[in-house]
Amino acid sequence: MDEDSDTTPKQQSEHKHSNERSHSPKPRKRNPIKRFLSILGPGLITGAADDDPSGIATYSIAGASLGFATLWTALLTLPLMSVVQYLCAKIGMVSGMGLGGVLRRHYSRSLLYPAVFLLLVANTINAGTDIGAIAAAINLLVPVPIVYLIVPIALLIVAVQFWGSYRLISGVFKWLTLALFAYIGAAFLAKPNWREVISATFVPRLSFDKTYLTTLVAILGTTISPYLFFWQASQEVEEEIRNGRQTIEERQGATYAELRNAVLDTDVGMFICNLVFFFVIVAAAATLHTHGKTNIQSATDAAQALEPFAGAAAKYLFAVGLIGVGFLAVPVLTSSAAYAVAETFRWECRLDDKPREAKQFYLVIAASTLVGMLINFVGINPMSALFWTAVINGLVSPPLLVVIMLVSNNKEVMGDKVNGLATNVVGWAAAVVMVAAAIGLLVTWGD
């Protein structure tokens, strides 16, 4: 990804110089490993949160029903996700505001309000199903009834968000990303035919079968999701505030070095996300599909079904991964919705603020979590709930992607940090793919 623009070198130099004066760089760490790890932050967390339990369920169902046939999509989605999340990061860094704030200031409310409302609904449903998945995964390890686990899990998540500092929360989130590697271990325990895996990865197997098309749309919908757009931009703002830039004016602008770091952060996060998505499909295809068990309904179904074919260790690794990424994903879902709502109405919205300092922001977080939790008690089928979440995300993503591309090319917002040619090509390709996916979703839904 490039950060070039149509401005002259002299203008770029002057703008860059002014940014460097207002954005004093962090002390450079001598140890290259520590320096690399210090760069990782919002992008890494975003990538890990994208592999939430509902995403793992989608990938497990893809592997169980279609075998290795959809592995090639990991190569397709990686550059698209990387560019989209980088653009969201860049918007947050350069504008000094989250995505909701930018849309409120520069674009029509008729676009902003419906998008934020649908985002809140979809995220609440998704958070609720993820809470249920965490409880089910814990039940695989400890024989405690699922119904007794749901309320404590929801309350623990809310408590950490309410009373933990941003530094604590981001640190915990980074450590939780390690849980994702459990899925890679489960895939190796499944002992797949690696020749078939390599072939399916690099030679796309296309089909117009309804199951194949529905699964393809579901994969795209769960990897390129609206809540990640809002989360990424808002977390970049949180990072700026953490570094002492309290006002929008202090946060506006970014140096090219900072943008290069954002590229690395988002690329690493999206690579890990897609690596996990790839290996979940491999694990499910090598065990469930191979042995004719093609009808599973959730990620926990997949974990249980792995045991007869790949051993108890694979089941436990799958369950541990679900628990870790679930505790990461639910706060991301509820916080991203809260950021969007708060920025829309110009409320205070910082995870470093105490609840009394940002009452409306924390109220949205609590309400979203607790309403989501209730989904597990009112008899709503979790797979049906996730389907409607996919429908909402599939319809909200395309217009938001178009807006992200317009914002990131708007000199009034971005100054000399508008997109270069390569970034625009891949970014608009992502928008086109998601428009096609939305049309595909409506077509397959109507059949």
Image (cartoon, rainbow, N blue to C red):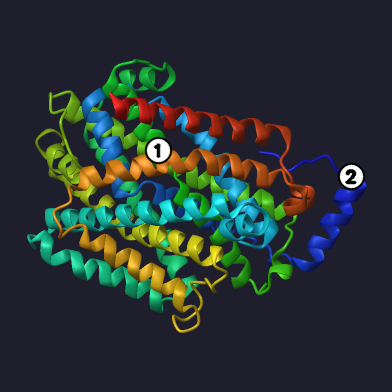
Quarter of the image where one finds residue 254: bottom right
The kind of secondary structure element at disc 1 is: helix
The reply to whether residue 68 is visible in this rendering is no
Location of residue 322 in the rendering, given as x and y in whole percent from the top left corner? 26, 51
Location of residue 50 in the rendering, given as x and y in whole percent from the top left corner? 40, 47
For this view, does 343 lie left or right of residue 175?
Answer: right
- In which quadrant of the rendered image does the C terminus lie? top left
Crowd rating for badge 2 (residues with CA inside 10 Å; few <14, some 14–19, many 20+):
few
Residue at the extreme front: 110
Residue at the extreme bottom: 356
Quarter of the image where one finds residue 439: top left
**Numbered badge on residue 369:** none
Quarter of the image where one finds residue 409: top right
The residue shown at (42%, 16%) is 203
- In which quadrant of the rendered image does the N terminus lie? top right
Amino acid type, residue under disc 1 in the picture: Gly
Front position among marks 2 and 1: 1
Q: Which residue is mark 1?
A: 221
Distance Cα–Cα, label 2 vs label 1: 40 Å
- Closest to the observer, 414 or 284: 414
The residue shown at (65%, 30%) is 425
The reply to whether residue 427 is visible in this rendering is yes
Q: Which residue is mark 2?
A: 9
Q: Is residue 281 above or below residue 57?
A: above
The kind of secondary structure element at disc 2 is: helix
Q: Is residue 161 above or below residue 414?
A: below
Amino acid type, residue under disc 2 in the picture: Pro
- Closest to the observer, 313 or 421: 421
The residue shown at (60%, 52%) is 89
Crowd rating for badge 1 (residues with CA inside 10 Å; few <14, some 14–19, many 20+):
many
- Closest to the observer, 343 or 415: 343
Location of residue 435 in the rendering, given as x and y in whole percent from the top left corner? 49, 31
